Amino acid sequence: MAGLAPATGKAAPYAAMVMDARTGEVLHSRNADTQLHPASLTKMMTLYIAFQAVERGEISLDDMVTITPLAANEPPSKLGLVSGQRIQFRYLIRAAGVKSANDAATAIGIALEGNEAAFARRMTATARAMGMTRTTFRNAHGLTEAGHLSTARDMTTLGRHMIYDYPQYYNIFSRITTDAGVREVANTNRRFLRAYRGADGIKTGYTRAAGFNLVASAERGQERIIATMFGGSSTAQRNARVAELLDMGFARAPATARLDRPRPVGPQGSGGADAPAPGTTARTVRVNGLVARSLRPHARAVPEPEAPEELLMVSADVVQNVIADVVEVAAAPDQTIAPPARPSEDVVLAAVQQSTTAPSAPEVVTRISTSGSRLWGINVGRYNSQYQAERVLLRVALNEMSTLDGSLRRVNRSPRGFDANFMGLTRDGAERACARLQARGTTCFMIGPD
């Protein structure tokens, strides 16, 4: 991709890192903590957040995105999008990941956060949550901009998260060509992918200020190595040096090692950690025990409008669908299950029984008790719709009944989405629940008393 900085005649600073991807062990480094221009390595974070947003229901791969003038006017490399054009989100991901298209990257950021500055703040916050302490993003594409800096260590860390946090999407980086909706595009990393045995990604980058950059990963047998290089003098020189770095990694890494996956990072939002917004409308319902039957009782009246919280209405069919999903996920945990259409008519959720005996009357809780020490809660994500948040809450409740027993499920709506919360916990209970959920790969954070 062409950069904005003027040519200086000087070689860009060199930096490198080699890591055993399985364990995170650093096998080689040079100037790894020096802040440099990352160029299009930036798009790894843009795509990480895009994958995160799809998985958490902020947007779907099939959603149509309207291209803004800002995105359409980005300099090359670009897909050639025009202002006002509508294109599926999946094609923006492909164009940004394979062709390194700047217009597609900017369109992704605006689609998710509304404007480029807010998306850049989300990128930086996500980087901090990963431990990328010396990285600051100013844009979604990586064109040279004051303060837009990273390091070889941080980009290696990001590459490792990309591999292990979103393996279902990682294959995009190994595609030699791909359909980007408006046309077929070729991979900017195709020469290295074809030349180095086991190479399957990840991302190239070039500006005049940065030089030729590359984060590459290769897998041979049970070994996987990540190598990062900043400051190459040409594509050929960069590829040759990264091949040497990967060779060094395979020579130094043990043949077998216990896989220590990095902890997935939750959505950070444009202003930092993703905390529930104050003054939002909440809906709560309690479910206790195991599901024996799911009945459809008569609808109950919604509480008076002066109450700050209203009754959560969930179809009994939703409960059955979620329970089926839990069983299916347990059998095939790597599969992603798309939510069905939300019921058109709301009914009160049936009470959940602990045995096969006749069910008792439905229990509905419309307000959280603040008595005792049960003033804490946990957040398990922000979603694009109330239905998605309700569905996740029910699935988590069924999977973690022992730690979440007695808690209240709460959906808080804000301008940025629907927060899925469990409330009415003690501090110890919230800490224990979060620890268990994180151990199972579900991101969560604690919510303290007001």
Image: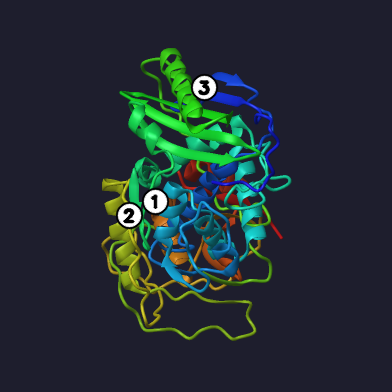
Q: Residues within 10 Å of mark 2 (few under 14, many from 20)?
A: some
Residue 388: image location, x then y, percent: 44, 65
| Image height of 205 relative to 290, above or below | above
Q: Disc 3 versus disc 2: distance between alpha carbons? A: 35 Å
Residue of label 2: 326
Q: Residues within 10 Å of mark 1 (few under 14, many from 20)?
A: some
Give me the residue at 42% from left, 18% from top.
Answer: 247
Give me the residue at 48% from left, 39% from top.
Answer: 203
Give me the residue at 36% from left, 27% from top.
Answer: 196
Q: Secondary structure under badge 1? A: helix
State how the image is colored: rainbow
Residue of label 3: 25
Residue 318: image location, x then y, percent: 34, 69
Mark nearer the N terminus (2 vs 1): 2
Q: Disc 2 versus disc 1: distance between alpha carbons? A: 8 Å
Q: Name which residue type carries label 2.
A: Val
Q: Name which residue type carries label 3.
A: Glu
Q: Are marks 2 and 1 in contact (CB under 8 Å)?
A: yes
Q: Quadrant of the C terminus?
A: bottom right
